[in-house]
Image (cartoon, rainbow, N blue to C red):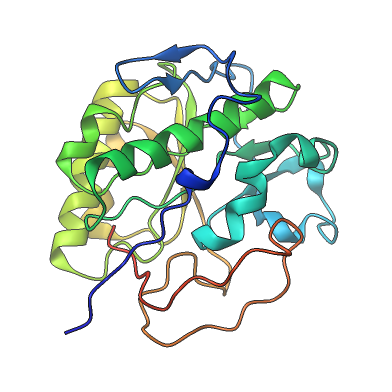
């Protein structure tokens, strides 16, 4: 039997450094993102490592749906990437994974890190779209914290409908998201899975964006070769055992 050992990104970063002055909410101290009320949904999404080659940055949002090991640099020093990200329509907060195998404090910490990076980018003039991630109903206590009511928000369904349990959890989380935040628009990176979205499109506007060929959260036990990424030039490769459960 293979034992899953999810990668925990948060514990290598200076939590009380340049993010110490961020406004926070709740017992977990989740940083607050201000709603971008005048922001329209982008026409396209592109992954963060493709910023140089994208021909239409003014209508494209940068996303971070990638393996956690590739996100270490943006988590550790968001200010380093302000200029390159500022060329784009908007930036979606990094998608640090929440796995059911993680301890609760680890899932909370990855949620805090998600909002923390976004809040820092927002304070430096970037238009930021909150990314919402959950793994179980227990996460509903904190995974929506720091996101203003009426915001444009983003989620990813990529790799999150491989089992009945995953599909049920995605739909349950979406219902909770709509009830709690009442988002203006939900951007969906991934497939339009009927079992997840049936009847929900009557409640809120969804915009769907197909994922890139590179899997954001692979389940395969085999190592996947990774191209060199500008945000993670020195990041260690993620273990093949770090397989996610949405």
Query: From where the camera sits, is residue 199 visible?
Result: no
Q: Which part of the image, by quadrant, shows the C terminus?
A: bottom left
Q: In the image, is residue 167 above or below residue 87?
A: below
Residue under the image location 51 percent in, 63 percent down: 67
Residue 24 percent location from the top left of the image: 45, 14
Quarter of the image for the N terminus: give it.
bottom left
Q: Position of residue 160 (x, y in %)?
A: 31, 61
The reply to whether residue 184 is in sight is yes
* Nearer-the-camera pick, 241 or 217: 241
35 versus 68 height, above or below: above
- Residue shown at the point (21%, 60%) measured from the top left: 166
In this picture, is 14 found above or below 207? above
- Please state the horizontal and vertical placement of residue 161, each as a whole percent of the image: 27, 64
Query: In the image, is residue 1 above or below residue 111?
Result: below
Residue projecting furthest to the bottom: 222
For the point 36% across and 66% down, which residue is it?
Answer: 159
Q: Which of 219 and 36 is in front in this view?
A: 219
* Left or right, residue 82 beside residue 151: right
Which quadrant of the structure image shows residue 48? bottom right
Horizontal relation, residue 154 to residue 143: left or right? right
Q: How many marks?
A: 0
Q: In which quarter of the image is residue 19?
A: top right
Location of residue 10 in the rendering, given as x and y in whole percent from the top left corner: 47, 44
């Amino acid at each position: 039997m293979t034992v899953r050992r999810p990668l925990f990104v948060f514990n290598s970063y200076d939590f009380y450094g340049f993010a110490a002055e961020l406004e926070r909410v709740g017992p977990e101290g989740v940083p607050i993102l201000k709603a971008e009320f005048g922001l329209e949904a982008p026409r396209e999404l592109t992954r963060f490592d493709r910023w140089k080659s994208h021909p239409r940055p003014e209508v494209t949002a940068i996303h971070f749906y990638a393996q956690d090991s590739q996100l270490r640099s943006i988590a550790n020093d968001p200010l380093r990437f302000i200029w390159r990200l500022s060329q784009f329509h908007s930036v979606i907060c990094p998608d640090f994974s929440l796995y059911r195998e993680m301890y609760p404090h680890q899932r909370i910490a990855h949620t805090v890190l998600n909002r923390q990076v976004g809040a820092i980018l927002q304070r430096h003039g970037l238009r930021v779209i909150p990314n919402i991630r959950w793994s179980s109903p227990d996460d509903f206590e904190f995974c929506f914290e720091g996101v203003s009511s009426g915001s444009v928000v983003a989620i990813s369904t990529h790799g999150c409908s491989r089992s009945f349990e995953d599909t049920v959890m995605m739909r349950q989380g979406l219902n909770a998201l709509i009830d709690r935040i009442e988002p203006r628009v939900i951007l969906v990176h991934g497939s339009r899975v009927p079992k997840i979205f049936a009847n929900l499109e009557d409640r809120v506007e969804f915009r769907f964006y197909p994922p890139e060929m590179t899997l954001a959260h692979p389940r395969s036990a085999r190592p996947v070769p990774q191209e060199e990424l500008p945000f993670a030039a020195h990041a260690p490769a993620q273990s093949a055992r770090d397989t996610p459960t949405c």
